[in-house]
């Protein structure tokens, strides 16, 4: 179980949220909802451990994650709108660099297989600077494939479906179903109400804030 | 006038016609230039007088001066061909510029190297920061900039356009090379051949020098033609690949 | 087929590989980097005026300043790029210490500048009229010094990540740190020219470089974590 | 309330305003820009060794090189940024000539560097032991020269928009073009120092600057159109 | 009527499309569909006049637009994923700079009114670097408001709904309806099949390519 225990976060001079309480399904699919600027991305980055918590804590398996950061980050894959791809490397090279950065190594064959999972294998030798928006996003999401091989437990995804075409969304949803079957936990933000018909847990930041206001 | 020019260009710009014409020129160019260079070298190295001041070192001149002259001249041609490319947008002009650039760069290196070799006995140092030497060095960097820039883009056309602009702007360097010896008092020799009042140089030196100059020029013309033809073939290959892509695509 | 290998040396080498792929893919890059340093030096020489006596006075200084100005901006640029494209976020989800990654980044920049420099050294020596006996010392000090400069550059570049108009701030932060390196480095070379003893300056140069080698990755890692947290 | 006003002068001024807002929002920016040049100069002074005779020899050159190195990188950066964030695409949907926009960009960079420089001039004069009689000439030539440098920098920066590893290429493209400005500029100042006649150099400096003023915006506009078309 | 007459476009060594023929509704809503990398963005940029046409032409009112570029660009507003916002300016300043760049000037009041149209007025003094993804997108789309005031005839929008929250999408759709009522022409790309229920014309690049292949 992953729990947000009275989490408060400031960015710059503004309070993004204070005393946020929520429980996430682990394993399971958790959707973070909320209007623009409500703090979805901020929350995701907080859970990933990028943004320091002002007060409160994030608890996983009864322990505060901030004190076991190294163990925690090993378990997650984070993808947001920035993708983390270098324009001067090809799709393949980017994926390989990312794998190595994670401390993993994999045969070329496996990498190609991963690319296939989002139908990206034919773009494998194309520079990121030449990819269309959707192709970039797919090149970033291909990383998720490796959670089946290495011990990844969490996906933190910030509007992952943005820019994907219909076919890719189907492939992506298949990946999600697979991961859920393997007891993975997915936390993602999306503005698309119709994206998931799986059972999922919704964390609606707007509602939570309203509740607090009352 | 302009129309006639563009007519000539259009006539030449047809790749097939270009190939036909150059096929005929190729062999004569190569043989004549080789003979002239060999003759020039013979006269220059064995059958011309020592300089009364410089001794045998003066013989470097027979390589140095033609190289210097060609390095400048080729840059001018490069820039002109770039103008044609930018204005009339003909791909052949781009191929020609691309072919000229490396040859010009080599000649400018040759000038620098022979000049340095000459400088050591004459001035006691390999290099001085004199205006002519520096502007020659800068010319080399213009060539280098052209070559690097035209290859710096994912798409060749983008590189060609940017690099053409650079080459055209770079023309301002040419008068500086040419007149630097007259404008500033430098160590380097002032012009003695291309002067208003005619050449002021020993006749026996003038003969091999002329031979070398013409020989070098014809030889570079030969190289340029070969280069352009190779690039034309490369382009044909690319077009084929593009066609294949198109088939795969559909 | 697949394996999980998080030894530090593995990570170090793979990051080196990425940096080289990004910056050093072809001979063209090598040529560009040589020419870069070369032209900065030419700019100086022409500014000062091309007289032998003057060059003798400023030769060493010019090479050093050229080196500094060719390492720092490019280092800054890659860090900025990787910050903007989200690569540092990805790094933060790795269990490998960011310090190792950053050490590898500065080492790769050091190599990326030093390899071309060693190729170009004969040219510089001719252009600046440097005496032959001074050459090994020059190469030695520049090799050491450039490592220190890369490390300092790394600190400076991470200091300004995400800062508004950080590019303007950068020199103010970096140059004070670079000054000791410059002084000791030039010190060695000048000592050789004057036929004095270069050892004390050399030792100081080495000492400073070692200190930076130890602390710089920690400082940069700290700064990058702060930048990510914004 | 609302009006459509596409007179060129209007566009010119509004672009100037945008550049100033982005780069010059507070006093801190002003201080930073001065410090940049300042520190480059200090780097040199320390490299050469702070002896009066040496400084006398290199003073003018250092100021000029510092000026060049502080204008061009920042100009490059903004152009690159506006290219990446899509601002140039927006510009392409304006019926106002891109040339005007670019002229305004180089003018704003010229002012952004020159205004702080004029403030800082007394400091430089003291640091570098420049004689009082040389000061007006120094200010004059630097003011003219920096305009030319901005214009050339603009061309260089637009040459590499969208190029692979363009930042490494930039100096190779720009420095050859800047050299005449440097030589004539330093020429004037040296002439004053030697009590010789500076006029011929000054005229050449002005001539070059005027030529660039006329052609540079056209060249850059052409290049940016090419870059957008990619 | 806007017509694509056998338009071919290459980027690098790859053919994006060749001999594309299509007719767009003017006025009207035109959706460009197609999978990732099919060339939607490329097509939009071509129509905007950014990318030179290899062969063929784009015809508006019987005239080739490439020869009347200045007139043409005055009539369009183009917004893609890059937004064209400077990180170092506030939302308000960015909008004002854009207006002036177009050669238009407007009172502060009108600008605020425009910001209100996408509920952005409260963010007016926030720097773009501090905006969330959706807020940035909205700051870019606010420009469309001015087509009611100045003579803009065309909107070219590349996946404009990406990152917008539900409320903003409603506001945005209202803007679209208004513009259509004023005889505007909208050309937009989107992967969201359910976005529009207005009458619209679909240009499906995948289908067009398949047709050509047969
Ligand atoms: C690296 C060093 C040198 C460079 C870059 C260089 C460059 C040049 C250039 C560009 C020209 C062609 C001028 C024109 O087109 O009119 C030239 C011509 C010439 N150079 Fe050099 N030079 C160098 C060293 C020397 C040395 C050391 C000498 C002999 C002392 C020398 C003697 C000459 C002579 C005699 C000419 C022919 C001038 C004429 O008759 O027009 N050069 N050099
Ligand atoms: N600068 C470029 N140079 C060369 N090829 C490019 C360039 N930009 C895009 N491409 C290629 O052109 C094709 C079309 O790209 P485009 O961006 O138009 O696709 P798109 O339909 O908008 O895709 P998406 O749905 O992912 O946004 C892609 O295959 C892409 O790889
Ligand atoms: N670097 C920053 N500094 C200060 N405030 C910030 C920063 N980044 C974002 N904010 C503010 O924090 C709030 C939450 O931003 P966040 O990006 O988390 O929103 P979001 O819910 O992801 O929105 P969207 O749906 O648009 O992506 C916003 O009001 C935004 O203006
Ligand atoms: Mg968000
Ligand atoms: Mg697209």
Image (spheres, coloured by chain):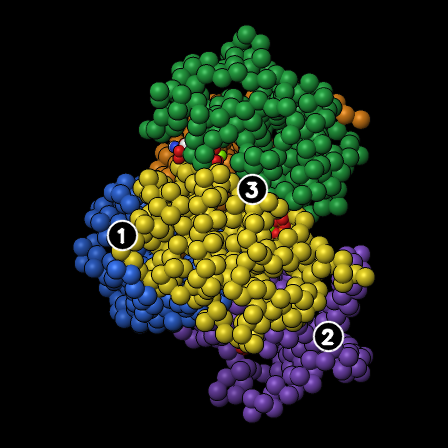
Chain colours: A green, B purple, C orange, D blue, E yellow
Mark 1 closeness class: few <14, some 14–19, many ≥20 residues within 10 Å:
few
Q: Front-most of D176 and C73?
A: C73
Query: In this image, D105 relative to E165: left or right?
Result: left
Image point (60%, 38%), residue name: A161
- The answer to whether the residues at label 1 and label 3 have Cβ atoms under 8 Å apart is no
Expressed as whole percent of the image width and height from the top left, the position of residue C93 reads 58, 25
Spatial CA distance of label 1 from label 3 is 51 Å
Q: Are marks 2 and 3 on the same chain?
A: no
Tell me which chain the residue with mark 2 is part of.
B
Of B102 and A148, the residue lying toward us: A148
Q: Residues within 10 Å of mark 3 (few under 14, many from 20)?
A: many
Residue C130 shows in the view: no
Q: Residue furthest left?
A: D132
Name the residue that disc number 2 marks: B225
Coordinates of residue D161 in the picture (x, y in percent)? 52, 56
Residue under label 3: C113
| Relative horizontal placement of residue C116, taking residue C221 as reference (left or right) | right
Image position of C57 with respect to B203: above or below: above
Whether B28 is drawn above or below A85: the answer is below
Give the x, y percent position of residue E59: 58, 72
């Amino acid at each position: 179980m992953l729990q947000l225990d009275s989490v408060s976060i400031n960015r710059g001079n503004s309070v993004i949220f204070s005393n946020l309480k929520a429980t996430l399904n682990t394993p399971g699919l958790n959707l973070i909802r909320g209007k623009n600027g409500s703090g979805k991305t901020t929350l995701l980055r907080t859970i990933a451990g990028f943004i320091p918590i002002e007060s409160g804590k994030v608890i996983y398996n009864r322990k505060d994650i901030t004190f076991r950061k190294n163990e925690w980050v090993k378990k997650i894959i984070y993808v947001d709108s920035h993708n983390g791809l270098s324009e001067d490397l090809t799709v393949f090279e980017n994926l390989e660099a990312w794998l190595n950065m994670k401390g993993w190594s994999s045969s070329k064959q496996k990498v190609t297989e991963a690319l296939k999972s989002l139908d990206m294998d034919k773009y494998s030798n194309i520079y990121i600077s030449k990819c269309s928006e959707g192709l970039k996003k797919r090149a970033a999401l291909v990383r998720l494939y490796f959670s089946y091989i290495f011990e990844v437990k969490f996906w933190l995804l910030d509007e992952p479906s943005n820019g994907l075409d219909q076919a890719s969304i189907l492939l992506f949803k298949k990946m999600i179903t697979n991961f859920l079957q393997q007891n993975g936990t997915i936390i993602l933000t999306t503005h698309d109400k119709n994206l998931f018909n799986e059972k999922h847990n919704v964390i609606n930041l707007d509602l939570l804030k309203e509740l607090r206001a009352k | 006038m302009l129309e006639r020019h563009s007519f000539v260009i259009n006539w030449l710009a047809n790749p097939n016609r270009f190939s036909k014409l150059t096929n005929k020129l190729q062999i004569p160019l190569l043989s004549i230039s080789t003979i002239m260079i060999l003759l020039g070298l013979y006269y220059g190295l064995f059958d011309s007088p020592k300089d009364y001041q410089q001794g045998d070192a003066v013989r470097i001149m027979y390589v140095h001066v033609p190289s210097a002259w060609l390095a400048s001249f080729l840059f001018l041609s490069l820039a002109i061909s770039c103008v044609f490319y930018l204005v009339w947008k003909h791909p052949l002009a781009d191929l020609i510029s691309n072919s000229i650039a490396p040859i010009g760069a080599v000649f400018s290196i040759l000038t620098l190297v022979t000049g340095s070799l000459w400088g050591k006995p004459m001035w006691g140092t390999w290099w001085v920061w004199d205006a002519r030497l520096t502007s020659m060095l800068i010319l080399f960097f213009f060539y280098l900039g052209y070559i690097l820039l035209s290859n710096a883009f994912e798409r060749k056309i983008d590189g060609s356009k940017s690099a053409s602009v650079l080459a055209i702007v770079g023309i301002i360097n040419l008068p500086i090379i040419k007149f630097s010896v007259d404008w500033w008092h430098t160590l380097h020799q002032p012009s003695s051949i291309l002067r208003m009042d005619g050449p002021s140089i020993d006749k026996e030196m003038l003969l091999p020098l002329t031979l070398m100059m013409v020989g070098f020029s014809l030889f570079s013309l030969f190289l340029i033609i070969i280069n352009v033809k190779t690039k034309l073939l490369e382009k044909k290959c690319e077009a084929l690949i593009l066609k294949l892509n198109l088939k795969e695509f559909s | 087929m697949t394996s999980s290998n998080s030894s530090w040396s593995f990570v170090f080498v793979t990051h080196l590989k990425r940096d080289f792929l990004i910056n050093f893919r072809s001979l063209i890059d090598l040529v560009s980097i040589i020419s870069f340093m070369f032209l900065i030096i030419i700019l100086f020489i022409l500014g000062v005026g091309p007289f032998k006596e003057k060059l003798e006075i400023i030769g060493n200084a010019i090479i050093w300043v050229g080196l500094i100005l060719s390492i720092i901006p490019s280092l800054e640029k890659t860090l900025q790029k990787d910050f903007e494209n989200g690569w540092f976020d990805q790094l933060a989800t790795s269990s490998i210490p960011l310090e190792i990654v950053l050490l590898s980044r500065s080492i790769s920049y050091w190599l990326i500048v030093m390899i071309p420099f060693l190729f170009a050294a004969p040219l510089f020596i001719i252009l600046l009229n440097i005496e032959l006996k001074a050459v090994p010392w020059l190469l030695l000090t520049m090799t050491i010094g450039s490592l220190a400069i890369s490390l300092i550059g790394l600190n400076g570049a991470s200091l300004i990540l995400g800062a508004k108009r950080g590019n303007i701030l950068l020199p103010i932060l970096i140059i004070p740190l670079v000054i000791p390196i410059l002084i000791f480095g030039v010190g060695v070379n000048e000592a050789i020219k004057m036929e004095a003893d270069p050892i004390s300056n050399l030792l100081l140069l080495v000492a400073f470089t070692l200190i930076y080698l130890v602390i710089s990755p920690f400082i940069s890692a700290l700064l990058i974590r702060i930048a990510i947290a914004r």
